[in-house]
Each structure stands twice: as C-alpha cells, then as structure tokens.
C-alpha cells in the first residue's frame, strides 16, 4: 500500500520569477536543436531578454502584493519584499547583459545554449534570494553556480576562458562545500533548518555560545563570502573575471554579488540575531580586508577587466559596511547601493566588451588611450561609471556610499566610516586612471580586429550602456522612491 | 519668478552644458551659444541683485526654494542666497562669462566638450554659493572638481598630467574628510539643513570641514598643488581656479565654518590666524621671487587667501565685510591677470620674465590693462582692494594689534611683487623675441578684459555697494546667522 504523501501547497505566484526564467531556459535549449543555425542567435537572445523582462515584471508584482512576509511551500522559501526586490535587481541586470552579449563573437553552435544558461543562472539566483532554509539555500547556490561554471568556460576559443571556468569550478565548489559543512554544523547544533527556527532554537536551548553553532555560522559566512568575492575569499575573482567572456563577467559582477549580499543579509539577521555582536565584527573584518585588498591590488593593474575585478572586491567591502552596521539604515543602504553598483558594473564591462571586439585583444589602460574621443557615447558612459565607482556626486554611487557610511556612523562605528573614506581616496587613483586613458592620452589609432575588420555598430550593446547610464545618474536624483522600495524590503528583517 | 531665481542661476548653465554635449553644432555656433548662455546668466544675476531686499537687518535668506530629496536622513534640495553669497555669485558669473568668451576667442580644441564643461562648472559654482543643505553643498563642491579635472588634464600644458593628479589627490583628501564631517554634522543635527541647524560644538567636525576649505583655498601649508595647477591649466581655467574656485573655499569657511561652529572657531582662532599670516607672508615672498607671470599670480593668490582668512576669522563685522569685498576684488583681479598672462603667452610663447620685457612700447592697450589691474591689486589707496584690505586689518586689530602689523607688512610685499611683474613684462629692455610681430591686445580681448576692469574700477569708487549690502544695511552688529558675538 502506498501511503498518501501530504504535498505542501505551492504558491505558484511567489515562484513566478524563477519559473519564467526556467521556462525560457528550456525554450532556448530547444532552439539549440530545432532551429537552423542563423536563427539561434536572434531568437535565443530574444526569448532570454523576454524571460528577464517577464521575471522583472513578475518580481515587481510579487513585491506589490507581498506587503506581509510569508513562508511558502513547507517553509522552503519566503515570499517577501526583500526577495522580490533582489529578484528585480537580478532580472534587470540579466536583461542588460543580454544586450551586452548579443554581438559577442561566439561560436554559433553554442549560442542558444549560452542564452539558456544565462536564463537558468538568473532563475537560480532568483530562487536563492528567497531561500528560507538551509537546504534551499544550498540548492539555489549550486543551481546558479553550475550555470556560471559553464558560462565562464563556454567560449573555448578564448584564451583563458576554459581556465577561468575550471578555476571557478574548483574554488567555487570549495566555497560551496564549506557552506554545506557549516549548514550541517548549524543543523547539528540547533536541529533546525529554517532560518527562523534556528533563531528560535538558539533562544530556547540557550545555544548562543555553542561552539558548533558558531563554527557553522563562520563557515556559512565564509561560503557566502566566496560568492560575494569579498576578501579573504576573493582569490578566484581576478582570474575568473579576466578569463571569462566579458558579458559573463558583467553578469557575475552584478547579479552574483547582489544575490550573495542579499542572502548574507537575510541569513545573518534572521537566523543568527543572537550572534549579532559577533558577526558584526566578522563582517567588519571582511570589510577591511576587502577594501584593503581590492583597492591596493587595483592600483597596479594594467588590464582593465582585472582592475574592475579588484574594484568589485572593494565594492563588496563597501556594501558589506551596510551589513556590519546591523541596523535598518544599513540594510536599506546595502539594497540601495546595489542599484547603481549593478548598473555601473554591467555598463563598465559592456564598454570593455565593445573595445575588446574592436581590438580583438584584451583591453588594457594603454590600448584604451583616446577611446573617449573616438567613441563619444561609450567613452562618456565609461567616464560616468568610473566617477560613480569612485563615489562622485551626480551618480548613484555617491548616494550609496553616503548611505553606507551614514549607517556605520549611526551604529556607532566611526572607525569604519574612516576606513571607508580612506579606501575611497585610494580608489580614486585607478578609477581616474581609466579616465586619464580615455581622454588625456593621445589616441593609439584604431587598429581593426585581426579578422573580419571592425565589427558593425552594436545597437543593443549601446542601448544597454545607455540604460546603465540612465540608472547610474537617475538613481542620484530619484533617491526617495528607490529608498522607499528598499525600506519596504528591509523591513522584513528583524533589525 | 523671484522664488526660482537661485534655481535658475544654478541650472541654466547646466542646461546649456547639456545642449553643448548633445546637440551637434559647429565650432563658431557652439562658442557663440556658450558665451550667450554665460551672458544670460549674468543677466539673471543682475535681475537677482535688483530684486534682492537688502533692508532686512538680519540679512535673511532670499530666493529660497526647498524640497525634500531623501527624507529618511533629512536631506533636502534647499537653495537660496544670503546677500554676501549673492555678491560672490555675481563675481563668479562675470568671471565665468569672461573665461568662456576668452576660450571662444582663443579657439580651444574639441569645443563641444570644452564649452559644456565650462558651463557645467558655472552651475556647480553657483550651486556651492546657493546651497543651504550641507549635503547639497558637498554635492556641488564635488561637482566642481569633475570639470576642473578634465579641463586641466585635457587642455592643459605639457606637464598637465602630473599637475592634475596632484590637484585631484590634494582636493579629494580634503573633500573626503569633509564628507566624514558632513555625516557627523548631519547626525548630530538631526538633519542636513544649514538654516535650521543648531550650533555645533565639535572641534573634530569643524576640522573636517576646515581641511577641505584649507586645501581648496589654499591655506599654508596645504598649497602643494597650487603652482603646478595654476601653471599647467589653460589661462582661462587658471583664471577660474584662482578667481572663483578658491573663493568657494573661503565662502565655505564663512557659511559653514563660522556660522555653524561658534565655539570651535573661538578655540582654534589663534592657530588659524597664524596659518593665515604665514601663508600671507610666505606667498608674498615667493611671489616676489617667482620666475614667471603665472608664478607671481599663483602665489599672490595664495597670499590673498591668507589675508581673506584673516578677515573672516576676526569674526566681527568689519573683518567679514572686508573679507567679502576682498573675495570679490581678488576674484576679478586674479581672473584679469591670468587672462592677461594668457594673452602675453599667446604672443610670446612664454611667461618667463627672463624672456619678456618692453611690451609697453607700441602696445598701449596691453600696458593700460596690466597697469590698471596691477595698481588695483597692490591696493593703492582709493582702490577697491585698499578698502577691502583696510577693513580686514581693522577687523583683525580687535583680535590683536600684531595681526594687523603683519598684514600691513604683507601689503608692502604686494606692492613689491606686483610692481616687479609690471616692470618685467612692460618696462625693461625688450629681448629680440619681443618685436613688432607681437601685437597689442585685439578688440575681442579688450571686449573681454574691459568689463572685468570696469567692475574693479566701479568697486574702487563704491566699495560700499558690497560692504553695506552684505550683512544687513547700516547695522553695527553681526546678523543672527552668526551664533556668537
């Protein structure tokens, strides 16, 4: 006799962003086998963009109709505004990355798979940010990580792509293993998987000084640190960012970071509120390490992708200040910061991709010379992105930095503000170094790519860059509506 | 419309900049357009002066607009003009118009970017003078740096890269300290508004602000960037830097330092006055020894900043009045001198005194312009600069007679370096390179320089235009804005 299994009720609406992306991924895979080669690229890109757009709209609807947080599907995922907002960020970044990817010179026989993987990775991230217990946490993490391992290695003709994929696979798996081990320790200590239940169990059983629990917490923090590419868990970042195809890098820098940071915020505040005094210090140490490593190493880079990789490490540090502050303002600051950061990051890598396709070789500070005058629109955009990274006004980067510093100040950690200010001062050197290359050096003269001449004008890439520009500058002026979105999302956290 | 005047003054040039960047125009159209926008800006400023109500004894904020920017931290778009700020804004728009016209005349390369940046800079500077929210002030303050960085780095002289880098590192170090101070100030105050604010007692926060202002002015010993930046910039950008941008720093001391930090200013008055006097004397001496025109103007500019700081930190009515008058005077003088330096350099390809001389013979317009400006700059009695320096020395006398004596000594130095400049360019024997092919000022150059000099002469005749209308007419006390007596 078969025992009747009680299946939990499924809230399909809460899952809609992930489902849209998964469905699109399946369609794109079908294209790979069913469509003639010349149609795969346009249609694959089209459905992928449509999927991200659909996921964005779905997430926005979930956001609108989820004023009260609820746990869904046997408490596996949580339907709340924090998850929905993060899904909107991820979907927005994915949409922009489709535009960046379109003209990438990729072997045509892989192109539909590329878009299938891109959509599936986005689906995994969207799933992960709504994770509500340690199992879904690990499931989501692996889901998008495996997609990214393949995406990094997809362009086997590109020097370094395969190496990047392998490196990411090895180190990423290591990070996942640490996270899994940490989860097991936490479960061993508390007997609970759900984030809320962990906190309750710690309360009830008086476990806040339990060594097993604290070890587990430390390992979870480390595992998420790998994904957020925060120092000292950053060592894969420069190589992978440099080796991966540039559109993939742009996706990783924006969406992976969003996912990892939002998840870290959620896990730390919901599952471990009793340990706030400990993880605050741990996160602050990670902040200092990230700011130091990212900024100092970026100073000496000539390769622009590598420099941006170190810059993304340092930005992980800046955004983690919001978590280290451990207050509502900090959570809000982190969420707000992700908006201009994602836009600047996708945009900057998109400009790098455009230059790369022109030259047919890696972009360095030397061969970027004069680019600003040759390509006024892309050059000016790159200029704005660099100023935004450096935290100049008239970009959202300034407001983001101002918010995280304010959060640290409010939490009473003035020293963290000072660390952040010093790091900002150091970062100016390499961000302005790019501007110097763009505008203040004689042009190297356009050398057409070795094969096939200069690529045609890339309308989609330019549209993506323009959209990034609008978000970067627009988020400076429209702070109030964006911060309201972030406030509503952050209010689900018990801070 | 009056309520919008401050906003218009800020955003009209920014809109002009966007047009320059986005609408394709030919070089001539573009230059004319930028000059026109700058002149319309001057027109709006004249309108603002005419509409301003000077009768209010407290010197209240006017043309005020306020709208929330982000409410959870209490940051708002709050702009308006105090009377003293209005005069500085006037100096700024006049100098910017002259600089833009000069750039048009001298035909800068890549005009779309150039004129757009100059107009953007104008808007940012007016924003600094108008902002009444400390974060907004910081935003405009930083926004000034972006165009300056590019203007200097792209269109500057042969050593521009090193000069630009030094300039940016110095100013950003100061600015980031100010950002820390802004955050601390805002949280201590409950909002970032400068008008509703409580007096702040923290010496550290004051020092954070003071660092940014001391670097930008520059005060001794934060002047390391100054000689390179002033030498390598295009002439009209150097004019803006020393004429206008340095005044935003002294304005910052006045608007934020002195009005918000009563006790720290009292506690730190002596060290600041010492730095100001050292800068005044040191700048004057180095100006006397400088080997080229720009060196003299650069270091004299630094000396003048010391003098203005002396007046500000006297913190009494005559000191403040003198400082504001001298800020306007020096802005105009310094801009005129830099544009003249640019005119000389265009003709002779050098600004070194060793290769100049005898330019007065056969070049009456150049000689007249340089003489007039130089004589006003050395504060000959009867000039506006004399009025300003007299008031400053009178004001600082209250704090101790020694400050006045040292200040007066520096004025003697001013005569020395200015007369040396005049004689080295105009009067000594002409080297062979200064021949008939070196022309007198052209009509277009006169069209740019004569209005500047006319403003100076006007202020020489009627310095009370500023001193009677900066802190409330005819009052003998400081307005309530200044929280201590």
Image (cartoon, coloured by chain):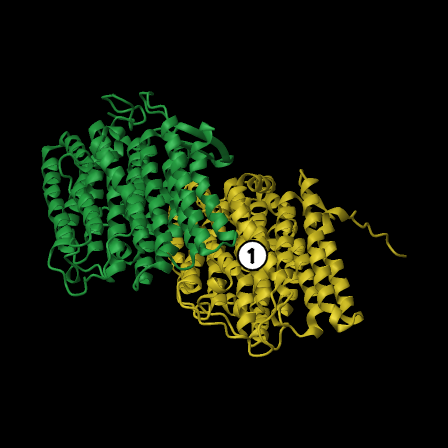
Q: Residues within 10 Å of mark 1 (few under 14, many from 20)?
A: many
Q: Nearer the viewer, residue B159 or A494?
A: B159
Q: Is residue B468 above or below residue B136?
A: above
* The quadrant where residue A43 appears: bottom right
The quarter of the picture where the N terminus of chain A appears is bottom right
* The quadrant where residue B186 appears: top left
Q: Residue, x 64% and y 55% (percent of image)?
A: A137
Q: Chain of mark 1?
A: A
As drawn, is A14 to the left or to the right of A346? right
Rendered location of residue A477, percent (x, y): 52, 42
As drawn, is A136 to the left or to the right of B16? right
Q: Nearer the viewer, residue B362 or B86?
A: B362
Any idea which chain is the yellow one in this picture? Answer: A
Disc tally is: 1
Rendered location of residue A435, percent (x, y): 43, 60
Tag 1's secondary structure?
Answer: helix
Any idea which chain is the green one in this picture? Answer: B
The quarter of the picture where the C terminus of chain A appears is top right
Q: Residue, x 13% and y 35% (percent of image)?
A: B381
Rendered location of residue A202, percent (x, y): 58, 45
- Is residue A228 visible in the rendered image? The answer is no
Rendered location of residue B422, percent (x, y): 15, 51
As drawn, is A125 to the left or to the right of B441? right
Q: Nearer the viewer, residue A196 or B76?
A: B76
Q: Is residue B463 above or below residue A115?
A: above
As drawn, is B483 to the left or to the right of B434? right
Q: Which residue is mark 1?
A: A257
Q: Residue furthest right?
A: A1
- Is residue B15 visible in the rendered image? The answer is yes
Q: Residue, x 38% and y 38% (percent of image)?
A: B42
């Amino acid at each position: 006799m078969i025992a009747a299994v009680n299946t939990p009720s499924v809230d399909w609406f809460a899952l809609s962003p992930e489902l849209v992306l998964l469905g699109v991924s399946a369609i794109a895979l079908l294209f790979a086998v069913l469509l003639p080669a010349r149609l795969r690229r346009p249609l694959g890109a089209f459905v992928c963009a449509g999927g991200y757009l659909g996921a964005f709209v779905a997430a926005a609807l979930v956001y609108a109709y989820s004023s009260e947080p609820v746990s869904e599907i046997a408490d596996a995922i949580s339907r709340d505004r924090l998850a929905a907002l993060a899904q909107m960020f991820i979907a927005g970044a994915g949409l922009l990355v489709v535009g960046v990817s379109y003209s990438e010179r990729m072997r045509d026989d892989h192109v539909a798979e590329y878009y299938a993987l891109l959509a599936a990775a986005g689906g995994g991230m969207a799933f992960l940010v709504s994770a509500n217990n340690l199992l879904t946490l690990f499931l989501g993490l692996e889901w998008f990580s495996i997609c990214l391992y393949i995406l990094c290695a997809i362009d086997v003709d590109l020097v370094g792509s395969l190496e990047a994929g392998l490196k990411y696979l090895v180190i990423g798996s290591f990070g996942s293993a640490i996270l899994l081990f940490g989860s097991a320790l936490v479960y061993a200590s508390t007997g609970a998987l759900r984030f809320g239940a962990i906190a309750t169990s710690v309360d009830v059983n008086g476990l806040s000084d339990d060594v097993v629990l604290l070890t587990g917490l430390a390992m979870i923090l480390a595992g998420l640190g790998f994904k957020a590419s925060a120092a000292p868990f950053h060592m894969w970042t420069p190589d992978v960012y440099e080796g991966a195809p540039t559109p993939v890098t742009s996706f990783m820098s924006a969406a992976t970071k969003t996912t990892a940071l939002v998840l870290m915020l959620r896990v730390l505040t919901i599952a471990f509120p009793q340990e706030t005094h400990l993880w605050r210090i741990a996160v602050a140490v990670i902040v200092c390490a990230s700011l130091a490593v990212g900024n100092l190493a970026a100073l000496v880079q000539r390769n622009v992708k590598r420099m941006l990789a170190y810059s993304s490490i340092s930005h992980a540090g800046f955004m983690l200040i919001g978590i280290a502050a451990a207050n509502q303002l900090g959570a809000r600051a982190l969420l707000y910061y992700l908006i201009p950061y994602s836009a600047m990051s996708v945009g900057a890598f998109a400009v790098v991709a455009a230059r790369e396709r022109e030259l047919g070789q890696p972009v360095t500070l030397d061969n970027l010379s004069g680019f600003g005058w040759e390509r006024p629109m892309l050059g000016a955009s790159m200029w704005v992105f660099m100023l935004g990274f450096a935290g100049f006004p008239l970009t959202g980067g300034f407001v983001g930095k101002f918010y995280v510093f304010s959060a640290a100040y409010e939490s009473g950690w003035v020293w963290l503000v000072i660390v952040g200010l010093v790091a900002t001062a150091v970062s100016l050197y390499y961000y302005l170094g790019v501007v110097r290359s763009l505008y203040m050096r004689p042009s190297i003269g356009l050398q057409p790519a070795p094969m096939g001449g200069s690529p045609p004008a890339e309308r989609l890439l330019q549209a993506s860059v323009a959209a990034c520009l609008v978000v970067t500058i627009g988020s400076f002026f429209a702070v109030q509506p964006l911060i309201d979105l972030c406030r509503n999302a952050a209010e689900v956290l018990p801070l | 419309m009056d309520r919008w005047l401050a906003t218009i003054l800020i955003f009209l040039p920014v809109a002009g900049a966007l047009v320059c960047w986005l609408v394709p125009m030919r070089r001539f159209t573009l230059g004319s357009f930028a000059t026109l926008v700058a002149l319309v800006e001057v027109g709006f400023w004249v309108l603002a002066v005419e509409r301003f109500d000077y009768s209010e004894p407290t010197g209240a904020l006017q043309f005020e607009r306020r709208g929330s920017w982000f409410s959870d931290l209490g940051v708002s778009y709050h702009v308006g003009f105090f009377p003293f700020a209005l005069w500085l804004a006037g100096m700024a728009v006049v100098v910017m118009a002259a600089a833009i016209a000069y750039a048009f005349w001298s035909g800068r390369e890549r005009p779309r970017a150039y004129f757009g940046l100059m107009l953007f800079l104008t808007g940012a500077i007016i924003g600094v003078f108008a902002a009444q929210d400390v974060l907004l002030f910081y935003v405009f303050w930083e926004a000034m740096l972006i165009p300056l960085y590019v203007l200097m780095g792209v269109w500057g002289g042969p050593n521009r890269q090193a000069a630009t880098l030094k300039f940016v590192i110095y100013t950003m170090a100061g600015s980031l300290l100010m950002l820390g101070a802004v955050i601390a100030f805002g949280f201590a105050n409950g909002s970032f508004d400068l008008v509703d604010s409580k007096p702040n007692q923290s010496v550290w926060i004051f020092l954070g602000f003071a660092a940014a202002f001391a670097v930008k002015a520059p005060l001794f010993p934060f002047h390391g960037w100054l000689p390179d930046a002033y030498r390598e910039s295009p002439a009209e950008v150097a004019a803006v830097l020393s004429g206008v941008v340095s005044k935003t720093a002294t304005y910052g001391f006045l608007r934020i330092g002195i009005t918000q930090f009563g006790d720290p200013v009292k506690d730190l008055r002596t060290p600041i006055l010492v730095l100001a006097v050292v800068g005044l004397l040191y700048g004057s001496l180095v100006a006397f020894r400088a080997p080229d025109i720009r060196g003299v103007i650069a270091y004299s500019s630094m000396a003048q900043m010391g003098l203005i700081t002396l007046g500000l930190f006297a913190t009494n009515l005559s000191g403040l009045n003198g400082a504001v008058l001298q800020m306007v005077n020096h802005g105009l003088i310094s801009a005129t001198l830099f544009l003249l330096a640019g005119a000389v350099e265009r003709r002779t390809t050098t600004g070194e005194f060793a290769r100049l001389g005898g330019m007065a013979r056969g070049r009456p317009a150049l000689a007249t312009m340089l003489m007039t400006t130089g004589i006003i700059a050395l504060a000959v009695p009867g000039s506006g600069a004399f009025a300003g320096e007299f008031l400053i020395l009178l004001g600082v006398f209250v704090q101790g007679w020694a400050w006045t004596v040292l200040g007066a000594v520096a004025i003697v130095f001013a005569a020395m370096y200015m007369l040396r400049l005049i004689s080295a360019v105009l009067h000594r024997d002409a080297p062979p390179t200064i021949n008939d092919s070196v022309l007198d000022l052209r009509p277009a150059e006169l069209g740019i320089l004569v209005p500047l000099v006319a403003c100076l002469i006007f202020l020489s005749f009627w310095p009370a235009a500023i001193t009677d209308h900066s802190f409330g007419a005819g009052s003998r006390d400081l307005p309530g804005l200044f929280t201590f007596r």
